Amino acid sequence: MTQTEALDAFRRSGALLDGHFILRSGRHSRQYFQCALALQHARLAARLCAALAEKLAGAPVDAVISPALGGLFVGHELARALDVRHIFAEKEEGKLVLRRGFAVGKGERFLVAEDVVTQGGRVRETLDIVRARGGIVAAVAVLVDRSAEPPDFGAPFVSLVKMEVETFPADRLPPDLAAIPPQKPGSR
């Protein structure tokens, strides 16, 4: 699947939105990826993640870990495509933690999976969980990379879609964006 084909699939599913959005980072943007709208379609989720898994061919991966909630489906589908187990980290008192009996084995090689990366905060939290338990981060994979500069996670980084999207601090919005009421799509 090419980037163009993936973007078309995101648009057809309503996952690529245009307007005025407040991102998790607090920055504002004209576009937003609501990947859940694409991932709600099981066959589309499988196709997108299988295409992403192809980019990881040969990566030494024992398991996949993803931050909840956005990375859950991506992590699960990547684990299926790679035929390895999947675990996830979830918020507890504002911080990502492992729960539910999930474990990271010493020397176990993990793929960290997420739906969208803008600044990579949740990916970094997940990397810290793996490394703090003696695991190895073999790679990071995301459906959509909207970062302004390639993130340095200390491991190979792959994305299905790379899209540079302008973001702005709340106090420096361009007039056209300021004229549109903002939305927080992650909470819709």
Image (cartoon, rainbow, N blue to C red):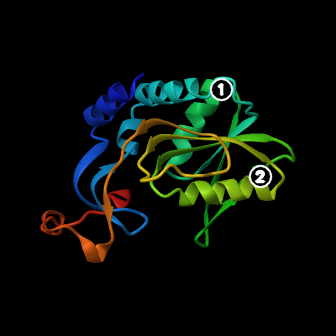
181 relative to 106, above or below: below
Task: Locate residue 47, reporting x and y percent.
Answer: 46, 24
Task: Locate residue 16, reporting x and y percent.
Answer: 29, 43
Q: Is residue 57 left or right of residue 36?
A: right
> Which residue corresponds to mark 1?
82
Q: Which mark is residue 41?
A: none
> Which residue corresponds to mark 2?
101
Residue sitting at the far front = 149
Amino acid of disc 1: Leu
Which residue is pictured at 59% across the width and 54% down the height? 123
* Quadrant in which the C terminus is drawn: bottom left
Q: Secondary structure at mark 1?
A: helix
Mark sitting earlier along the chain (1/2): 1
Task: Locate residue 41, reporting x and y percent.
Answer: 39, 32
Q: In terms of image quadrants, where is residue 107?
A: top right
Which residue is pictured at 38% across the width and 58% down the height? 186
Amino acid of disc 2: Gly
81 relative to 76, above or below: above
